Amino acid sequence: MTKKDAYIKNGSISHENINFYNGYGYLIAPELLSVSEIDELKNETAAIFRGERGKVEGLLTVEANESDEDVLKKYVAIHFPHKISPVIHNYLSHPKIVHVLTGIISPNVKCMQSMLFVKGPGKAGQSWHQDEFYIPTRDRSLIGVWIAIDDASIDNGCLWIIPGKPGYMMRRVPNSSDEYADVDTIDVSKYGTDAPIPIEIKKGAVVFFNGYTLHSSKRNKTTDCFRTALVNHYMSAESMLPWDQDGKLPSTEDLRDIVIVAGEDPYAWKGIVEANKPYLRPEVLKIKAGL
Ligand SMILES: O=C(O)CCC(=O)C(=O)O
């Protein structure tokens, strides 16, 4: 296995890619989405935050002469945009993304979450964490799909990853760095300062990372660049999803607010529910439970 196995060539996942993912917990597919698809996503992002796709609590009134940039600067991200945007909903099952997911997870794949980050100049990043801590999948199949809608660089707050999943949930401690919006973080210092790698990618590239993979993003230090990214989360359709959204939803053994993007749903007899509503991400992220 070499570092180049982290890269999916021409959108076609190889055995080397799958071995790399199993060992290091991430893959990068450069140019997976076309220029016109990225333009479509960029325009849709502006429409969503301008309120043109429907009401979301906290969205501010847009003045007639307000530019997209001036509107977007006010927000960090919206959760569950696919609930109001048919365009975003379509991208959940983009054939090139589904090809990679079925290569890694299972022929049967479901999506349970979308998040659309705008992360304008000055906005804080997200501290070190593992997604499986928030979205429990029982079979560890959780995968984040991070679609770069703008070029992502160290300056504008790209994703950082520590390759090689620890395979267990790490302890969270109070966060003291102003890079991050969160009040807590995982202390990754035992891995050494060289362990975290920045995922600097061009728009149209897609990063796939496992629910146990340690990742974070720093503050956007630019004065004029957004770092727009659509991040969707998926898992095997065979596994149930005991996800109560940190107590926002009634506790459940299997949240059925999902979208099947490949294959069959073994639990189709349970039906689909609409439990989640889109909401704006707060500037400060509170801890999930006690440290
Ligand atoms: O894009 C970011 O800033 C953070 C994304 C992330 O951590 C996640 O999707 O779990």
Image (cartoon, grey):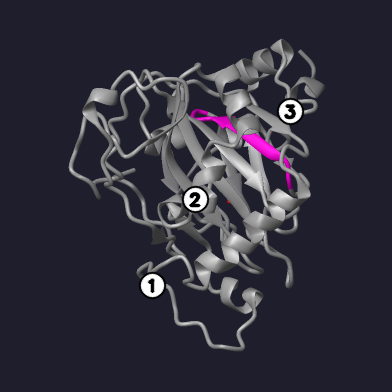
Instruction: Tell me the residue at 65%/31% (across/down).
Output: 96
Q: Position of residue 291 (x, y in %)?
A: 34, 43
Q: Which residue is mark 3?
A: 11
Instruction: Tell me the residue at 54%/52% (across/down).
Output: 87
Cβ(mark 2) to ligand 1 < 8 Å? yes
Q: Is residue 134 magenta?
A: no
- The residue mark sitting in front, 3 or 2, is 3
* Residues tagged 1 and 3 counted as in contact (Cβ below 8 A): no
Q: Is residue 209 magenta?
A: yes
Q: Nearer the viewer, residue 275 or 270?
A: 270
Q: Nearer the viewer, residue 284 or 186?
A: 284
Instruction: Answer with mark 3 or mark 2, whichever residue precedes in sequence.
Output: 3
Q: CA distance from mark 1 to mark 3?
A: 38 Å
Element on which disc 1 rests = loop
Q: Which residue is mark 2?
A: 115
Instruction: Tell me the residue at 39%/23% (across/down).
Output: 237
Callout 3 crowding tier (Cα within 10 Å): few <14, some 14–19, many ≥20: some
Left or right placement of residue 34 versus residue 59 in this view: right
- The residue mark sitting in front, 1 or 3, is 3
Going by the numbered disc 2, the residue's amino acid type is Met
Label disc, if present, on residue 220 of the rendered structure: none
Q: Position of residue 4 (x, y in %)?
A: 81, 23
Instruction: Answer with mark 1 or mark 3, whichever residue precedes in sequence.
Output: 3
Range shown magenta: 204-212
Q: Which residue is mark 1?
A: 58
Cβ(mark 1) to ligand 1 < 8 Å? no
Q: Position of residue 77 (x, y in %)?
A: 51, 60
Left or right placement of residue 51 versus residue 64 in this view: left
Going by the numbered disc 3, the residue's amino acid type is Gly
